[in-house]
Image (cartoon, rainbow, N blue to C red):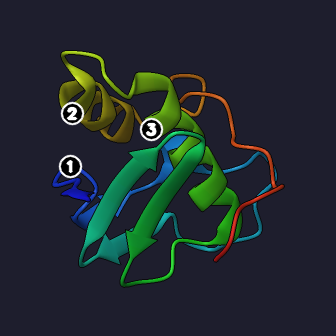
Amino acid sequence: MRNNPQLVGEHDFSAFRSAGSSTRSPIRNILRADWKRERTVCSLRSRRAVLEKRCAAIVGTLVEVAGKINAEEYIREILESKDSEKAGPTAPAQGLFL
């Protein structure tokens, strides 16, 4: 399991926010985010709540960039952009556990 330092800390997660979200603030403070991918199982663990729709968007993006040379930089750019068009596809709800 590998830690995703670019997700750790206080960030504006607007880029991973679903359209029409009723959440007051897109800002969340993530204490730890671990990413593990084995065959067809991907796991993202966070020690603070990241609302379920954001989680699916983050997982979908991590799956898309997994293995790319500049994946960490890409995630950082998405967070800084606050633009959901820059994020990867949202992971399907089947198999997501919060």
Q: Which mark is residue 87?
A: none
Reading the chain from its start, which is encountered first: label 3 or label 1?
1
Residue drawn at (62%, 72%) of the image: 51
Q: Position of residue 81 (x, y in %)?
A: 37, 31
The residue positioned farthest toward the front in the image shown? 39
Spatial CA span between label 3 and label 1: 12 Å
Badge 2 crowding class, 10 Å Cα cut-off, few under 14, some 14 to 19, many 20 or more, is some
Q: Nearer the viewer, residue 57 or 92?
A: 92
SS for dot 2: helix
Q: Is residue 67 above or below residue 11?
A: above
Q: Is residue 78 above or below residue 44?
A: above
Q: Quadrant of the N terminus?
A: bottom left
Please tell me in which quadrant of the rendered image residue 62 appears. top left
Left or right placement of residue 65 versus residue 51 in this view: left
Q: Which residue is mark 3?
A: 62
Residue drawn at (32%, 35%) of the image: 75
Left or right placement of residue 59 versus residue 77 in this view: right
SS for dot 1: loop
Q: Position of residue 44 (x, y in %)?
A: 45, 61
Q: Quadrant of the C terminus?
A: bottom right
Residue drawn at (31%, 75%) of the image: 29
Q: Position of residue 80 (x, y in %)?
A: 30, 37
Q: Is residue 62 above or below residue 54?
A: above
The amino acid marked with disc number 2 is Glu
Q: Which mark is residue 72?
A: 2
Q: Quick check: marks 2 and 1 in contact, CB under 8 Å?
A: yes
Q: Which residue is mark 1?
A: 6
Reading the chain from its start, which is encountered first: label 2 or label 1?
1
Q: Position of residue 45 (x, y in %)?
A: 41, 71
Badge 3 crowding class, 10 Å Cα cut-off, few under 14, some 14 to 19, many 20 or more, is many
